Image (cartoon, rainbow, N blue to C red):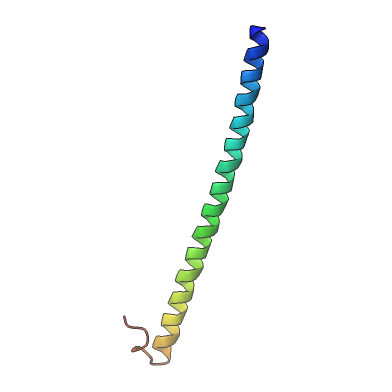
Amino acid sequence: MEDHAFELIMKRFDEQDQKLDRVVRLVETHERDITFFKGMVRTLAWAVGLAASFFGLKHVWPS
């Protein structure tokens, strides 16, 4: 009886551990997506600033 209870506890622990692993992978994926998005926004801001300075519109994009 005790062995059966221990096996049930271990099975439940393994299930929770697998769920936690899935959550961690999901968070890591979203973190990479957010980092990529931030990089794209910075690149876009840099490109707009470069274009503004190239066309002599520095008053539009203050430095």
Where does the image place residue 20, in percent across and percent down from the top left? 57, 36
The residue at the point 49 percent across, 59 percent down is 35
Q: Quadrant of the N terminus?
A: top right
Quadrant in which residue 53 is drawn = bottom left
At horizontal 48% and vertical 65% (from top left) the residue drawn is: 39
Camera-side residue: 17 or 41? 17
Task: Give left or right: position of 44 versus 62.
Answer: right
Identify the residue shown where x is 57% and y is 42%. 23
**Location of residue 37 with respect to 24 vertically, above or below:** below
Which residue is rendered at x = 63% and y = 25% of the image?
12
Quadrant position of the C terminus in the picture = bottom left
Q: Position of residue 52 (x, y in %)?
A: 42, 87
Comparing 34 with 11, the one in front is: 11
Which is more toward the observer, 53 or 62? Answer: 62
Identity of the residue furthest to the left in this view: 63
> At which x and y percent is residue 47?
47, 79
